[in-house]
Structure formats: structure tokens, C-alpha cells
Amino acid sequence: MDRLSGLDASFLYLETPAQLMHVCAVMVLDQSTMPLPYSFDELMASIDESVHEVPAFTRKLRGVPMGLDHPVWVHDRQFDIERHVHRLALPKPGGYRELMDLCAHLAALPLDRSRPLWEMWVIEEYRPDGEGTDENVVVFAKMHHATVDGVSGANLISHLCALEPDAPPMALGEPHHYPRDPGRPELLVRALVGPASKPVTLAKVLGPSAGLITKSIGRAREGTAMAAPFSAPRTSFNGTITSHRSIALADIGLDDIKEIKKATGTTVNDVVLALCGGALRAYLDERGELPASSLMATVPVSVRESSKRTKGANKVSALFTKLGTDTDDPLERLEMLSERNRHAKDHHNAISADALQDWAEFAAPRVFGLAVRTYANLRLAEKHPVVHNLVISNVPGPPVPLYFMGARIDALYPLGPVFHGAGLNITVMSNAGSVHVGAIACRESVPDADALVQHFPGELERLKRAVADR
């Protein structure tokens, strides 16, 4: 029986009608590389053949009686690809604006929890320049965060891809044998036994957590602690969110980022965060909303290599970092971020890779869900100090071109979830020498996400000039 880990299950409990826990991607495909002319029916049939080899695509949730323990994954024996892969065409002129409006609408739709938690929308007649006869096919993919995190989501997509147009997807291999489905009596026993073991688990995590608090206080006194939550300035995207979304995409050069990294002795992640800080500063300054103190981001960190847990789709922790939005000079911002990130990483490395997963095991399903709904209904995100301003993720992507069902992936834009109190998410992914930026936000908080992402190329040029002139 495949029980959801506490961290995976927490993303189910966090979901409300406005706060949807989806991990999305926009894939722009070049169908001219396909061995046979593009056909939606053939594309869907190829996807159907591939996903049967990957359990994450064909499993669904089964609840535990009375909600006393986290749900379990079971094989969907009535799996039907037509419930998951859909076809749409963009309205004319079929350009970027029409694509963003459609993707924002699709991102705001909840997934059906009675089925495997994913969908793909094949969008036809996309003309990037809004005119001409050249068309691209776009796939808008959506998976629940209970199923994937950023890294595993990227890996899952890559399993459906190949390194050559006419090669079989990398997902194809040995048939997967699913465990038997648990009966209701077995689930009831689990519901009774699971909570009884929590005091023992609690005793195991309290000691290390107490020691961590003591060390954190010491780091704070030395000035080497990571940024503290609840210390961020309030902005227009830090409040209660709605289910409406706005989406925007941008492209920047990976080689430029690597050159800056090499010249300054920083990291790719430092440069990405500095660009985010610069773009946010410019966006808020244009709106007359730039706070005097720096914005703070939560940055998810993969712990797959250091985690001792073998199960669970989400293997992440997080660190807090100030983005230097209170500094106009791009090079100064990068240098400050690099130093802060070193301290934050040292602080973060002192935390057990499984600490977040361990504490998540104590989330009581009914109580957790009720607390989240109460938090949203009372609009508490607008009343307490701001925990963080936004989430920024940097996900490593494929270094070489990938082919999705024979079509080359020209661009792969990731999109993460937004939360009450942090209605903006920026996710960055490298792909075959390019860096693709995806921004998703609550539409009421960030009505025009394009106004933000359009600053990324300019901020990269500013940083390049600053490095060259120093």
C-alpha cells in the first residue's frame, strides 16, 4: 500500500477554491520535426502508450476512513486518456496574448480528485508573432503538487520525451507492477494505528529541532543566519488571493548568466535571484509601490540527494533570502545576494534534509484542512506580518534538446502555485542553452504579469554592463 507522505499530503490539505496546488508547464513544440505530420489523435495515442509505464500518471487517491490518516495511492483501473488529454485552438490572431489568457484560465481550473491528478491541454494554431502562417503546437501540462515537486515534475516530463524525433520516449521500459488495492478494513486499521505512532515520532524530532533553534539564535547574533520569516515588507501581491490567474513568460540566455557567474565568483542561482530582484524592483517602482526595505523570497531547495526517505514525491526544503530590491546597482545586488545565500545555505545545511517531511507527518487531515479554509475565509494573510513576498524556484532542465512525441521542445516554461499571503510565483528553468522564466500570479494582485517579466532581459543587460565596467 502506497501511503502519501505527510509533505505530499499537506499540498492536498492546503488546497482551497482559490489556492490551487498545481505545478504547471507551458511547452512550445515544433511539429516540423515530427516523423509524421502532426495529428492530435496520433499525439494522444502516443501519450497514452507512454504514461502507462509511469505510475505517477495512472494512480489516484483513496481516502482513509474518517480522514484519520493521509490518503493512499491506488491504481486507476478505469484510466482513460481522453479524461486527461484535451484539444483546444487559440482564437485569432492566435498570438502570445491569446495564449497567456488561455493558459491563465486553464491554470485556474481544479483537478478532479477522483482521477489521476494531471491534465494536458494540446493548444493548436499558436502564432508567436500573431501573424503569418507558421504555427506551433503548445502543450499546457498540469500536475498536482501532491504528485510532484519542481525537480520530479521536470523529470516526469522528460520521461515522456526522447533525445531524437523518431526515438521511443524514455518512459518506455519494463512493465510496472502495481501493488494490490487495500480494502476498507485494511484502511481502517491504518487509520487507527497511524495516529497512535505519532507520539513516538514526535519524541524523535523534538530533540534535533530544539538544538536547531539554539543554533539559529547563535547564527542570528553572529549575523550569519538566513533571513527571518515575518520580516518582509507588504506589497500588492501579499494578501488573500482569488482563483483568477495571470501568466507571463520570458527568455534569457544561459551563456550570459554563466559568464556573469564566472566573472563574479557567484553561482547561477545567485545570478537568477539577482535578476528577479532587479525585475521586481523595476516593476514596483513603475507602480509607485517600491518599499524601502528589501523584498524576501522563499526559495525551494531539493533534498533528494541527502534525504534518507525512499518514498514521497516531494523531497524539498526551503530557505528565505532577501532579494536586494532596496539596491539600484545590479552588481551590488548580486554581491549582497551571494553573501546572503552563502549564509542561508550554511544555515539550511544545518537542518536535517528530512526535517520538513518529519514535521509534516503530524498534519491531521481534517484539522489541517479546516485551518486552511478558516485562514482564507478570515483573510488573515492581510492582518499578520508578511511571512514572505513570493516564491522563486530555479529548476535545472535538460542541457540538450528534447523531443515530445517527435516534436522538438523549443521552450519549456515552468509555473508553480501561489498562496494566500504570497500571490506571485516566479519559476526559472534551463533548457538546451536557454533559460525560460514563468511567472504566475493572482490576477487581482498582479493584473499584468507581463509588466514584470519584461524586465528580465533588460536586467540581464544591466548586470552584464555592470560586470564589464567594474
Image (spheres, helix red, strand yellow):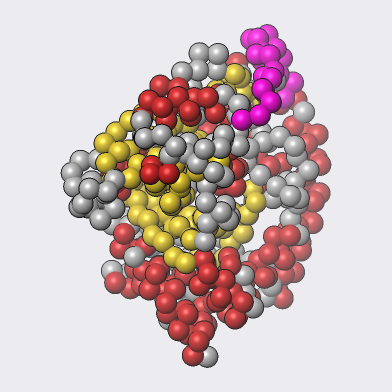
| Residue 131 drawn at (x, y percent) | 20, 52
Front residue of 363 and 82 = 82
Q: Residue at x 32, y 38 (%)?
A: 123
Inspect this view and state whether residue 350 appears.
yes
Give the side of residue 291 with respect to residue 89, left or right.
right
Q: In which quarter of the image is residue 168?
A: top right
Give whichever of 46, 459 is nearer the camera.
46
Q: In this view, does 342 lie above or below 77?
A: below
The magenta segment is 172-194
* Percent position of residue 225, x then y: 67, 68
Lateral position of residue 279 relative to residue 190, left or right = left
Q: Which residue is drawn at 72% across and 66% down?
A: 346
In reply to whether residue 409 is colored magenta, the answer given is no
Residue 169 is situated, as x and y percent measured from the top left of the image, at 56, 35
- Residue 188 visible? The answer is no
Q: In which quarter of the image is residue 184?
A: top right
Image vertical order of residue 468 relative to residue 38, above or below: below
Q: Residue sitting at 50 percent across and 13 percent down?
A: 78
Q: Is residue 186 magenta?
A: yes
| Picture residue at 60% right of the left edge, 26% below the top | 53
